[in-house]
Each structure stands twice: as C-alpha cells, then as structure tokens.
Image (cartoon, grey):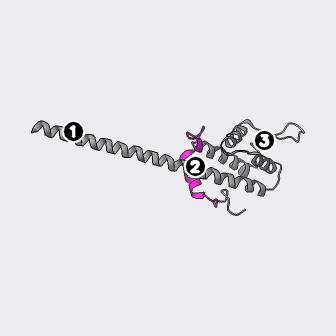
Amino acid sequence: MDNTYWNNKGKYQEDYRFYCNLLIPAFDKADTIHGELLRCMSNIYYDVLNNGACNMFHTWDGDYELYIENHYKSQLDYIESQLGSTYALLEACKDVYRDGPWGPFHRVAEPMIDKVMEIVIEEEKKREKLQWSKSQLETASNGSSKEDTKSEATKETC
C-alpha cells in the first residue's frame, strides 16, 4: 500500500499528526475518549511497524501459541469497545510477529485509523463549538453587566 500513515500519506495524515500531538500525553492515558482511542491505535500501529510486534506478544518455550502482553490486550479491548471487533487487527499483528507479510496488516489497520480519525475530528469539532459557545456566553454576560453597571452609575449621578 502506498497511502499509509506509516509513510506519511494516510487519508487524514495532517489531522493525524496534529491530533496525536494535541491529544496524546507523553505518559499515561489521554484525557478524552477519542484521544485515548487515538493513543491506543497509534501505539499498536507503531509497535507492529517499528518493532515487528515484538513488544505485543510472547511465547513460552517451544510453544507456537502467541500470548498478547497485558498492556496491548487492554489497548485492543479499548479499541474494540469503541469500534467493534478487533479480531482481524489482532490476527494481522500476529502474522507480522511471525514474519508474515505486512500487506494484510495495512489492509486492516489503515481503515481502522481512518475511522479513528473521523471520530477524533468529529469530537474535536464538537468540543470547539462548545468552547466557542461558552466564550460567547461569557462575553455576552460580561458585556451586559458592564452596561448595567454604567446605567446604574449614570442614574446615581443624575
């Protein structure tokens, strides 16, 4: 795939970069539901593509069964709670870990990141509108009280 977030050509690449910097803290969880969704998806995406998913899984001696690390399991669970099934994502991550092809991972992960970004963009627009509305109310409230104060002062001097 040519248009991936990994090669800086994702569908919402500019927004992805902007909101990762805005919403994802250096440590700990994000403050918003959509920020946490972005953090979880970005962590999994990064580990798979940068480390071959070697931090996500472990095996026991001679066992072919892969066990997912708790940290990544909780992130997959969070993504699933917001987007639905993560089975295909988990299987694609396992394939990469087993030295499988990268293509299936991209075919699963890229649309998931697109969906996460659509949620993030929508939620941030709502948040901006709410903040704008609050500031307009404060401005209107402060403006009318100044006028009321002026009127009272004028009445007292007359």
Chain-order first, disc 3 or disc 1: 3
Q: What stretch is highlighted in magenta?
A: 8-34
Q: Which residue lies furthest to the bottom in this view?
A: 2
Chain-order first, disc 2 or disc 1: 2
Q: Which of marks 2 and 1 is in front?
A: 1
Residue lying at 81% horizontally and 50% vertically, measured from the top left: 95
Residue lying at 65% horizontally and 48% vertically, measured from the top left: 42
Q: Badge 1 is on which residue?
A: 149
Chain-order first, disc 2 or disc 3: 3
Residue 2 % position (x, y): 70, 63
Q: Which of marks 3 and 1 is in front?
A: 1
Query: Mark 2 to mark 1: distance in Å?
Result: 43 Å
Residue type at the position of mark 1: Thr
Residue 6 appears left or right of 139: right
Q: Is residue 8 above or below residue 62?
A: below
Quadrant assignment for the N terminus: bottom right
Residue 18 % position (x, y): 55, 53
Of 77 and 43, which appears nearest the observer?
77
Residue type at the position of mark 2: Val
Residue lying at 30% horizontally and 41% vertically, measured from the top left: 142
Query: Mark 3 to mark 1: distance in Å?
Result: 67 Å
Which label belongs to residue 120?
2
Tell me the element at label 3: strand
Which label belongs to residue 44?
none
Q: Badge 3 is on which residue?
A: 57
**Are circles 2 and 1 on residues that touch, CB within 8 Å?**
no
Residue type at the position of mark 3: Phe
> Mark 3, residues whose alpha carbon is within 10 Å: few (<14), some, or many (≥20)?
some
Q: In which quarter of the image is residue 67?
A: top right
Say if the magenta span includes residue 68: no
Residue 139 appears left or right of 42: left
